[in-house]
Image (spheres, coloured by chain):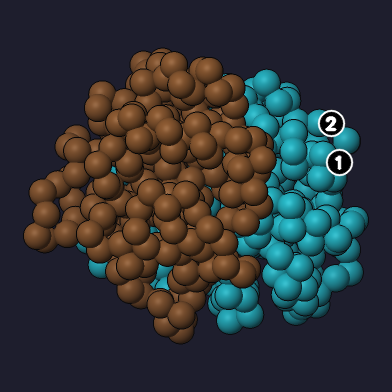
Amino acid sequence: MITKRIIPCLDVKDGRVVKGVNFEGLSDVSSPVELGKYYSDGGADELVFYDITASSDGRKLFTDILRQVAQNIFIPLTVGGGIQTLEDFERVLNCGADKVSVNSGAIQNPELIAQAAQKYGNQCVVLSVDVKRVDGRFMVFAKGGRENTGMDALEWISRCEKMGAGEIVVNSIDTDGVKKGFDLELLAAVCDLVSVPVIASGGAGSVADFVTLFETLPKVDAGLAASVFHFGEIKIPDLKRELSQKGINVRI
Amino acid sequence: MIAIIDYGVGNLFSLQSSLKCIGADALVTGDEEEIRKSDKIILPGVGAFADAVAKLRESGLDKVILEEVAKGKPLLGICLGMQMLFEKSYEYGEHQGLGLIAGEVRPIAPMIGQGLKVPHIGWNGLQFPKNKEKSRLYRYIEEGDCVYFVHSYAAVGCEDALTAATEYGAMLTASVERGNVYGTQFHPEKSGSVGLKILQAFCEG
């Protein structure tokens, strides 16, 4: 049976991996190439490589860094950050990405999802959505979580799935960086809504948070995190052993 | 030298990197002479069957591959490249494949039943057929090892050639082998150390 995926996310700024609490106060952690290889060799099921500054200041991904990461890892690689056109898809796919994650680019031009899905296949197009509660409603935020788009998150996710998004990364701004667990309420709502894989992001602080995620929401396909992996607070082999002992099917 | 066939379909970067990692001498090429000079051939592929087969035929490389395989040269088809080894595919119509292995390619949705997502995407375990010797490709790995799949179609009617299956609501064809022709539905170049060991086994012959 297919396994639950554990995905470290490498947020990259100026060629270095960073991670901020609630997207603010970035702190340098390490080299993307070294971290990527460390994770690929150490049991990660997939890597996500995001240029987190790309959409706010228009900087393009450093494709040479990406190429170096891709040359050294032999697990699936998703790339995002500043993806606004089909040319951006082409550029990162040529550097070794397997999937491309769109966020602000899709908000600005929703047709991008349909066009990319048609050209590269649904499996290649990942919708990443930053969600925050506003007056009790799940709203889509843009610009790295700084700007409320005024769009209802569940409506947006459903629309993107229909246009061809093959996976949904649901990042809860409310739980991100807090390390008290994933946003189960939001994730449950998304799982009920879509039939493509759902990747939970934002809030993992301990091994127990992943166990709770997969036990509570069997429809969630993967758990994504950054700092808890980068700072060694959770070691992926330990995490997988614990999940396996709890009866959750993972790749050991 | 191993020729990775470049016929304008798919991303060959990862495959090239993984072969480099295991120390294999590999060349991404669409050149007939290079392919004829090679010791082994890898046929990759992603995307839609009809488009990929059309591009392969337009390039004329389908004939080159068939002639080299007939001479005994080992061939490994990966993902869509594996599906193209079969007689036909029912992906958006009915399309002829290379016919190197008996069987056909059909959508997995009716096979796997309700509640499972399509495409079958992620890491899944390999199960070897009980009544057969383990494939040479798997000599460095164990039954149950996980490999990475991304597909919405799967080969059926190929029991004779089956070397591994994977469980996803049904037993889906994971790999096949007939003489010097091998195919993997999964992506060895994306399957971590297990995948590298499979590629190494192919490269060593």
Q: Is residue B38 above or below residue B54?
A: above
Tell me if I can see residue B51 in this picture: yes
In this orientation, which residue lies closer to the viewer: A226 or A36? A36
Tag shown at residue A59: 2
Instruction: Determine which residue is flagged by label 1.
Output: A56
Q: Choose top left, top right, bottom left or bottom right for residue B131.
A: bottom left
State the CA–CA distance, disc 1 to disc 2.
8 Å
Q: Decide if residue B178 is on the left or right side of residue B53.
A: left
Direction from residue A95 to residue A247 in the image, left or right: left
Which of the numbered marks, if any, corresponds to residue A220? Answer: none
Query: Viewed as shown, does residue B148 lie left or right of B130?
Result: right
Secondary element type, mark 1: helix
Amino acid of disc 1: Ser
Q: Is residue A175 visible?
A: no
Please name whichever residue, B142 or A225, is drawn nearer the observer in this view of the structure. Answer: B142
Q: Are marks 1 and 2 on the same chain?
A: yes
Vertical placement of residue A213 versus A238, above or below: below
Q: Residue B61: percent from the left, percent from the top?
A: 56, 34
Chain of the residue under label 1: A
Name the colour assigned to chain A in the rendering.
cyan
Q: Where does residue B173 sit, x and y in percent of width and height?
A: 34, 61
**Residue at left offset 66%, top offset 40%:** B58
Q: Quadrant of residue B87?
A: bottom left
Q: In percent of the image, x 19 and y 38: which residue is there?
A: B136
